[in-house]
Structure formats: structure tokens, C-alpha cells
Image: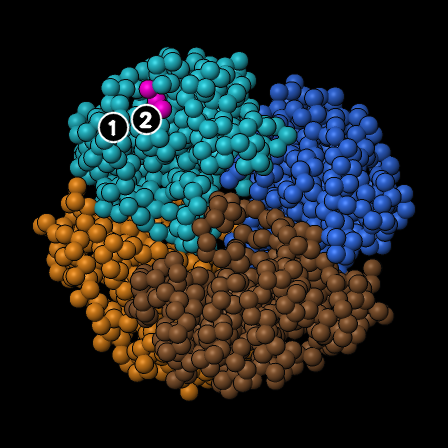
Chain colours: A brown, B blue, C cyan, D orange
Amino acid sequence: MLNVAIVGASGYTGLELLRILYAHPQVAVTCVTSERSAGKRIDEVFPTLRDRCSLVLENLEPVRVSQKADLIFTALPHKAAMAVMPTFMELGKTVIDLSADYRLSDAEVYGAWYEPHLNPELLKSAVYGLPEIRRESIRGKKLVANPGCYPTSITLGLAPLLKNGMIDLKSIIADSASGVTGAGRGAKVDSLYCEVNEGYKAYGVGGVHRHTPEIEQELSLLAGEKVTLTFTPHLVPMDRGILSTIYATPLKGVTTEELNELYRNFYAEEPFVRVLPLGSLPSTAFVRGSNFCDIAPVVDKRTGRVIVVSAIDNLMKGASGQAVQNMNIVCGFYESAGLSGLALFP
Amino acid sequence: MLNVAIVGASGYTGLELLRILYAHPQVAVTCVTSERSAGKRIDEVFPTLRDRCSLVLENLEPVRVSQKADLIFTALPHKAAMAVMPTFMELGKTVIDLSADYRLSDAEVYGAWYEPHLNPELLKSAVYGLPEIRRESIRGKKLVANPGCYPTSITLGLAPLLKNGMIDLKSIIADSASGVTGAGRGAKVDSLYCEVNEGYKAYGVGGVHRHTPEIEQELSLLAGEKVTLTFTPHLVPMDRGILSTIYATPLKGVTTEELNELYRNFYAEEPFVRVLPLGSLPSTAFVRGSNFCDIAPVVDKRTGRVIVVSAIDNLMKGASGQAVQNMNIVCGFYESAGLSGLALFP
Amino acid sequence: MLNVAIVGASGYTGLELLRILYAHPQVAVTCVTSERSAGKRIDEVFPTLRDRCSLVLENLEPVRVSQKADLIFTALPHKAAMAVMPTFMELGKTVIDLSADYRLSDAEVYGAWYEPHLNPELLKSAVYGLPEIRRESIRGKKLVANPGCYPTSITLGLAPLLKNGMIDLKSIIADSASGVTGAGRGAKVDSLYCEVNEGYKAYGVGGVHRHTPEIEQELSLLAGEKVTLTFTPHLVPMDRGILSTIYATPLKGVTTEELNELYRNFYAEEPFVRVLPLGSLPSTAFVRGSNFCDIAPVVDKRTGRVIVVSAIDNLMKGASGQAVQNMNIVCGFYESAGLSGLALFP
Amino acid sequence: MLNVAIVGASGYTGLELLRILYAHPQVAVTCVTSERSAGKRIDEVFPTLRDRCSLVLENLEPVRVSQKADLIFTALPHKAAMAVMPTFMELGKTVIDLSADYRLSDAEVYGAWYEPHLNPELLKSAVYGLPEIRRESIRGKKLVANPGCYPTSITLGLAPLLKNGMIDLKSIIADSASGVTGAGRGAKVDSLYCEVNEGYKAYGVGGVHRHTPEIEQELSLLAGEKVTLTFTPHLVPMDRGILSTIYATPLKGVTTEELNELYRNFYAEEPFVRVLPLGSLPSTAFVRGSNFCDIAPVVDKRTGRVIVVSAIDNLMKGASGQAVQNMNIVCGFYESAGLSGLALFP
């Protein structure tokens, strides 16, 4: 059994890690930390865990955490993750980091969108953990930067087109929408039930959302040249899910049928990407609680544009599910271990 | 008092008309029809009306309806509206038609997207009832084609840009999302609570939604040349609301500040369009139950694109509210009569 | 025009007062206060008010408020209301108090459930503002204690039975459920969208909810002797609404038909109580946004128990709507002024 | 591997069975039937199953089903189940029946609440499958009547009190609320999103819900004498979950602490019943997607009443989860096989 710690366990991604790992055959969770709830039992914070997990939340002391676990999931806000990462690395731990701190390979870009990076030298040793794109680079790594939720849905949605050089790189628009868990578990008026319920809105309009440089980094790597896109996130009154509707202009004419086949081939071996049959479209409802990314590419015959729709559960393939998938790859476990559950519908 | 009939009163737009007209000082509803509920009292079908409206739903017999009312709202499915329209016209009635049947000025286009038009000669006498664009043409008209919900949000969102020739007409993408009332009150598995709740999905992807030609007709008129766009609707788990996020490439550089001023000037005299202050963005929650259209134009500095976000209540400014606004204009009433209510939030 | 102030205007009941009063023909809102948002324009806090109300929120200084208004709605937390009430009273203002501070006529009971009362002498001059029960006592009063939401639904539900001495006073159980606006607009984890959504729970189980003594006070007055009940509130994932399902044992056999007639007669003259026809049951959906209380009494033939179901909108008849109704009565306005809007459904 | 059929697989309980059994180590689903969708692939009907289950839905022909499977889950409406049961029995199959047809041991009672029973002789061989109450009787049975959702929550909530003869049997009131999956997947206006959303209502008020005799049968067996109760179901705008708030008068004084200990002891060995710690209360959100029943007994000190709150997921412990638990017991599998998943929260 691999001893595992969850640092930042009192948030939604922390709880989702606990839910997944409870069913994982090769893992034991031995340590959970939380600044806001240290001293409490985790099942007091999350009653879903009652009778199944009674670990006591601790303050985050990296050395002590390292004594209790060999692999650490850091489910912290950005900045908090990079504050503790050097200690984990020095002590030889393997870390799957769910924050944004090691996703951008260029410390200057990180500085421009977040703040000065505390340990830019670690960026080189980190791998961006999107298995479908760079599975081999993940194996055995000590520091995996787990991708953001929006970037996962958009990168998987565009990868076949970009890898095959099929679209005008200046034409990309990603219009995405997220459930409310994406806003985290902090006590803010904006996240109150009555503020969110029965409303739909855009936010971060105009290319100012912090996932933008992460998306562009990954799309650029796939395309082999710099990609700049327009990305607009929206908030949907539901708990979980991200759906991205992505627009691009193809370099030459293409049909929906051809795209569907291209996507099927591209993702043929992937356990968690489902290219939908012709005529079907994704819904976040059909991936809720599962690690799937459902994708459908469509051509708008009237304008010639390509439209790709992709859906994930933001807490699963968009965060904790992908983090466990990365752990499985890093550790040489069966890649789907703990992740084979079907979506909960309704 | 103007005697008014609501034909197709057992659907959501019919009920919304009743709610609005109940508070209208110059109108008396004298006749309501419904095929599925004929013989029932309207307050049995919609208990919100108890103690306030006890009209009995009748079968739709155009002559009898015409005897009871001088102005008729037709809240029928497409095709059903054009089946009864000639009678209403012959009898000299004024009709505000909430169906799609008289929105497209070209019968061939109607035929291509719906079915052969039954009375194409009436199309010439109909006016497309978007007051902000053609208020003067609406006054005194006998047949007003009340705009669709998506077209209203998109046309109002783009009008200032198109009227001023500011954008590349081939660059327009409208990504819209609607609450579930948009699907009507028919008993379909797809509209069941548990099918819709906690899910977000695109539908009609690839330019196949029937509102597409209507949107293009209106944008083309504003632009003075043919516009073809990509339009993607989505379904949001909420009762009411449409939000459109519209993308376009400006012909020359422009700032958010300049656009905001342009929009403020363009809509300065409009009672129901609110151009939001800089830094604010629309939400469907803030227009729910009201006749407002909230709009915010934003420039994405990194890509140069213009992004316009507009929000309406699909049952109000997207249907029944706009229909009453049209009635007010046609009849020379105060344009906001019955429509001055603020949004219900939360 | 009556000049009116809303003290505590940045909460949900404050906003609801603004929404109602905007449509009230005899009232002008001249002052709004908020501790958390002082200095902001009210339409920045509540975008539904844009273009319609641009008052600036002030700190609560009772003397200044009194200079600006003749009637004051205090929409404050308990304790905060009684801190400012003496000043308002000394200055001769009329106050409709939406807090709990003047609802309990016995200062000791208040002290036992809340904290020591700051000005118990004012309790005598206050009237408990449930118009259906004591309309005449409200007329002309200077201090109206606006009833709580749960107490309103339960008292109206039981009044006909208690007034007629028809039930065993030891048998009363009120099982109530509220939408989330009842929890207010404070930033608490427990009120976050993702904590509340898709869950239903009881709270305050065992007679510990603070509305209990208020309910018992009113039921006792109606019965003419002391009533003790079991009251259990629940939280429903919806914005608005309270539904109470109330159980009692009748002193002698009675039928649903007899009860229905009794209730119809009892409330025959009431503008805002609707006793439903036989076979119909209330839903919070049918009163949302309106000032109605819908009631249906039913007899369980198998056990002989009486079950009364009553539904209100907690922000309307359960708070701000009733407050305006009280203002109308106090001031001699038409009792339904500003309150005639039908429910917003869906 | 046990070959299993799901008869009536296109409803919500059918899908939930598929979701559970997909993760069950000793079971293979070899046959699925559906009248409304025969001929379709199950993953066309339920896209959550894509890439994981591609069985084709068949018409319900009992003999052919019996050739393909040794154990059959009948997830049919009442009456439809008893129409096919004799064939399954004659062919020696084991059936877990999720309908109401074999829950009532008295054919006359069934006839009074439903319709004449088609094969009353089979009632004797059926066992009511509530494992916590009669686990030993379930082992090896050929026909298990899987309990209803409301009866499960109420029976588990009251069992410790009834077994110990602690309450006045005439005092029981069960006030329950269910998510919308309880209404099934039929296309009805009443179950539309916009009809259900943002509303809370009681239904079947007055002891007329068909689960009433089932509840009374089980409570009577536990009490050792006839129990008649008042049961009121409510509908909550959420997908899953049942919460029952149950009231009873104890025969002698008792404290919350004593009850908590009594319940803990009573359910000490149960894998799926969690008696909550003192001060905690159940929420349907904390059991969603899991097979748990969470229970908290509380004493109302002011009235002396006992209040028990219990929560289940109606599709899991209230239907399909309990059905699999029964299969595990019947077949001698590990009782939690396939059922160990934690709740999905949020």
C-alpha cells in the first residue's frame, strides 16, 4: 500500500480525492491537512465520510506530512503550494499538485498572471500532467502539475485538430461554462446559493481569466507555434461540470464525419476520452462523478467553422480524478485504478 | 379598456402574458384558448391565478375569439399560428404573434427552415416587432411578428456595432444559453426535471437551430448586407433567462471604453435596454421577471476581438414582455405600461 | 407621497422592500442604510435596480434617517433593531420592524430565547402585525412588529381551528420547510450554493428554533390558553418559499369538506389568503413573488388527524410583503397597494 | 460470475442497477429489457454508459430473459411485475422485485390500495427485503420484495423504538420529502423541470399515498400490534434523496442521549446504517449515490416528543442499492459488494 497525504483536504477537490482514494486498491490515506479546520475530524467537516474515514485534520507542516506519506496531493490555493513544495522535493516525495503553481513552464508568464514565482527552478522538473498528451513524460516524475479544469476540457477538445495542423491558429474561441464547485468552498457572498441559483453569467470576459496562459501554453505546444485565443468562462447553477464549446476556422474544408473519425482514431486507446457517435452531443450530466471527457466535433456547413464540444466533471477529470490518474501513471498502477466508476445520473 | 384574447394560454408564454396584463391599466383579458385544456378554468391550470382570473379556456375558434377581443396574442407553435391568422386579419383584428410564422420576410427561407408557408402574402403586412430597431414601423400595424428569444438577445447585442459598420461581418459567433422554459410546457422526457437538472449542454450545434435565419435576417438589415453567423444554443438548468456571448472581429482597433460609450448613446432613450457600467457584466438573474435587456461590450485586448454579453428573461423581453411592449406601441399606450416591474431577485 | 427609509437595505428583505415600494403609488424611498456596503450605490449591490434606483447606502444614524423619512422599515438582525428603536420612537417616527425584537410581548421570554431586551417598555406599544388576525389594532400604530416567516405560515394555517376551539392544543406539530433566502445574505459556508444544492435537511430539531416562542404566543392568543407545539424547520434547495404541514388532533370528528368551508368563511374577506378548492394543495411555486398565503386543510380519515398545509413566499407574506401590507394599514392606504402582483411562475 | 437480467432497464432504478452492477465483482449483466426503448442500445438511452455497456434493450419475454440470466431484477411498474413473476418462478429463477407487487403480505390490502392481485399465492413465498430487520429470512429466497423508498426510511427510523415498545403506537406521524427521481422517468407535465424547480409541495395528503399500508405493515410487525400512522410525502426540487422527519410520543420520559445510545446499539453491526453523533442531523446530500441510511433521534424537551430524522438516497438504499444488497444476501456474496462507494458530494 502506498501511503498518501492530502494537503488541503477541507476543500471540494480534497474531498473528491478522499472519495476516489477510498476505493483505490493500492493506496492508504494516512494524513490530511487543513488550515481552517485543523483539529477536527475529517468526517465532521464532510459527513459523507462518516464511518469510513476518521482522520484528524492537521496543520500543514511539510516535514511531518512527509514522514507520514510517500506521495502527496497538494490541493492548495496557488502560492500556498509553492511555499511548501521545496521541502517535499528535498525530502524526496512525489507530489501531484492541483494548484496552478507548476503548470506554466515560464516563470515570467506565471509572474505576469499570478505573482513572482518562489521557486522557478522547480518548474523544469515539473511535468504538466495531461495523460492523453504526454503520458510517457509523466511516468516516474516527482512533481506533476495537475492541469486546470478549463484547460483540460479545451486542450482535449482541440488536440486532434492542432496536432494535425488543421485550423487557423488565430481563429480559436473557447466559450466555456462551469458548475459552482469551481469557485471553491470559501465563504463568499458571490458563491451563496441565492446569488448563484437561477442565474447564468459570464465572468472574466476579455481574456483576463488566469487559465488563459495555461490554455495557450498547451495549445501552442500541440500546434508547434504560438497560439493566442479568446477564452470566456461562464457560471452555471449546478454543482459540477465544465462544458467547452470551441470555435475554429479550418484551413481547408472538412466534414463532421471526417472530424468524428479523426477524433475517434486520435483517442482510440484512451480510457477516459469518449468521442461521441455522430449526432450525439456531450452534457455535463453524463460525466458527473466520472473521469470521462466526452467530445463531439461538428462542422457548421453554412460558415465552414469547426465547433468542438467537450464535457468533463471539473472535480474529476478537471481536478481530483485526473490527479489520481497521474498518480497511477507515476507509480505504475493500473491507470484506471479507483477511477472506473460510472457517472451518477440523475 | 382594450379587450384582449390570448390564444394558446396554457403554455408558459401564455401565462406570462396573463401575469403582465393583469397589471396593465388599459387592458382586459376577455378570452383565453387552449387545445389541451379547453373547458378547464385557467386558474386550475395555473394556480398562480387563483382568486384573480377565472376565465374558462376555450377551443381555438378564430371567429369567436374575434368577437370577444380586438387585439389577439397568438402564443401558438409555428404552423398553428399561420393556420388562424387569415381569419383574424380578415376580421380586422390586431395580432401580436409570438410564433415564428411571420418573422421571416422571405417565404422561401421560412419554407427551408420550417415548412411551406400557408399565407405568404401576409408576410408583407407583418412587421418584425423589435421596438429598439423599428419602433416607428410598429405603430398602428395590424400584424406584429414578435421576435424570438435568442434573436432578441443577439440583435440588441450587435445593433450598435452593425449600424456603425464596425465589425467584420464574417466573424460573428453567437454562443447563447437558455433556461428551460424555452423548451415549452410539452410533456417530453428531455424536459423532465431529472434530465435537465445539474447538467449543461449544447444543442443544435452546427448552425441548425431554427432561430439562425431569423438572427441573420435582422443582422443583415442592420448591416446593410448579408450576414452569416455561427450560432450555438445551450441549455442551462434554470427556469428563465437567455444570455448571449457574442464574438466579432472589429474592422479597426477599439477599446472597451469606446464601445461602452457607443452603446450608451445608441440605447440612451430606450426604456428597456441597460448598458452596464464599465466593469459590470450581465446575469440572467438580474433581469428575471423584468423586461430589461442588459448589455456589456468588452474588448479582448490580447486578440483584439469584441465580446458582447447580453441578458434577457426569455419569457419577458424574449417573448411576452416584448409582446406587450409591441401592443403598447401599436395601440399608442405608454410603452412601459404593465412592464415597469423590477426583476425578482433572488 | 410618504417618505420612507429602509434600514438594512443590503439584505434580501431590504431588496424585496425596494422592489415592492418601487411600484407603490404613494411612497418614495428617500433613504437606505447598510453597514457592510455604506457608500456604495444600491444598484451596485443589487443590479436589478439599475436605471431605477440610485440611492447611496448610508451608515445607520437614526437621527439622520429620521430627518429623511416619516416611516422606517427596519430590516436588521435582532438586537440591532432594538438598539435604534428608541430614537425612532422619540422622534415620532412610524416603524415597521422586520426583526424579532418586538414580536414577543414578554421581555422574559425574549431574554430566554435571544438575550436581555434593551427597551422592554417599548414592547407594550408594539403591535404584532399579522393583519388577518389583528388588523384593527394595527391601524395608526407607531411600532409594528412584523411577524416571522414560519410563524406567519403556521398561525394563518391554524387560526380557524384555534378560534373555534376545534383541536387538542397538546397535539400540534408543525413541520415546515424554507427556501434559502431565509438564511440571509451573510457569507457563510453553510449557505454556499454547493452546500445547499441537491440536499434537503432538518435543522433546529427538538424545539430549539427561535421562532418557537413566537409561534406559541400567537397560537395561545388565538386559542385563549397556553399552547406548546413541536416545530421542526427544514431547508429546501430553492430561493424562496415556506410551506408548513401542520398536524393536530380534532376534539371531535370533522371532514375535509367541513374544514374547507370553515376556512373559506374565516378568510372570506382577506385579500391575501386563498383557501384552495377541495382536492388542491399549495406549493411554494404558486406564491413566489406574491403576497398570498395559500392554505388547504385536509382530514386523514384513517387516523382522524387534521392536516393543514400552508404556503407563502418567505420574502413577501413572510417578510417584506407583509411589512408593506402593515404600512398600508397603518397609513390608511389601500391595503393591497404595491402588493397586487401575481406570482412569477415558472 | 452470476448472470443477471434487468427487466425495465430504461427507468432511473434500472440505470442505477446498471451503475452499481458495473462495479460488482461477481456479476455480469447479460440482459436488459424495456418496452419503450426495445431495439435501442442501452448507452443510447443512457449516455453515462457509453464505452462501458452496449447491451441492446429487448422486449420483455420472460422465457427468453430466463434463458439469459439466473437472477432477475424486475424494475417495473406495479402490475407489470406480477404479470411476469409466475414464469420466472416456474423456471426457478431468483427475482429481486423493485415493484410494490409482493411487498404487502395480505392480498386484500394490496387489492384495496392497488388492484386485485394476479397471483396471491406467490405472496407467501416472497420475503420483504429490508436486511436490517430480517436478514436471515432473505438468505436463499427466490422472491425478494424490495421495499419502497419511503417505507425504508421510516421503518429504519422507528425500528429501535418499536422493537423496544417505547412509543404510543397511535402517535406516529411521518413527514417525508423526496427528490424528483421518485416520480420516475415518464413524460408528464407535472415532472417537467419548470413545474418542479423552485417549488416545494405536499402531495397525497390525508393518508392516501400507496406506501401507507406498506409502512404500517412493517411498523406493525416490529411493534407486535397494529400500527396506524399519518404519513405525508412532499416533493423537493432535487434529483435524489428522501428525508423523513418522524414524530412519536414516548411512553415514558427519555433523553436524546439515551435514544442515541439505543440506536447506536441497535444498528451497531449494520454496514449501511449510520446513527449520527449527538448534535448532528442527516441531510440527503450526505447520502447521495451511497447506500447509507443516516439517522438521528432527538427528544423535544418542551413537549416530550421523540423526533427521528432519517435520510437515504431513494435510488440507492430506497431502491437499487437495497436490491443489490438483497441479491448479495440471497446469493451469499459479501453484503457490501458493489455498494461500498461513498456519497458524491457536492
Question: What chain does badge 2 belong to?
Answer: C
Residue D236 at least partly seen? no
| Residue D187 picture location, percent across and down | 54, 55
Query: Which chain is mark 1 on?
Result: C
Q: Which residue is mark 2?
A: C82
Q: Secondary structure at mark 2?
A: helix
Q: Nearer the viewer, residue B46 or B138?
A: B138
Tell me if A130 is positioned left or right of C7 in this view.
right
Q: Is residue C85 magenta?
A: yes
Which of the 4 image quarters holds residue A61? bottom left
| CB contact under 8 Å: marks 1 and 2 | yes
Height in image: A336 above or below B6? below
Q: Quadrant of residue A255?
A: bottom right
Q: Which mark is residue A262?
A: none
- Residue at x-position 43% and y-position 12%: C332
Q: Relative to A197, does residue D44 appear above or below in the rendering?
A: below
Q: Is residue D3 visible?
A: yes
Residue D292 image point, x, y percent: 33, 66
Left or right: where A156 falls relative to B157: left
Q: What is the magenta segment's predominant secondary structure?
A: helix
The stretch of residues the image draws in magenta is C82-86
Nearer the N terminus, badge 1 or badge 2?
A: 2
Q: What's the residue at 56%, 31% (across, down)?
A: C41
Instruction: Specify whether residue D255 is painted magenta.
Output: no
Identify the disc placed on residue C117.
Answer: 1
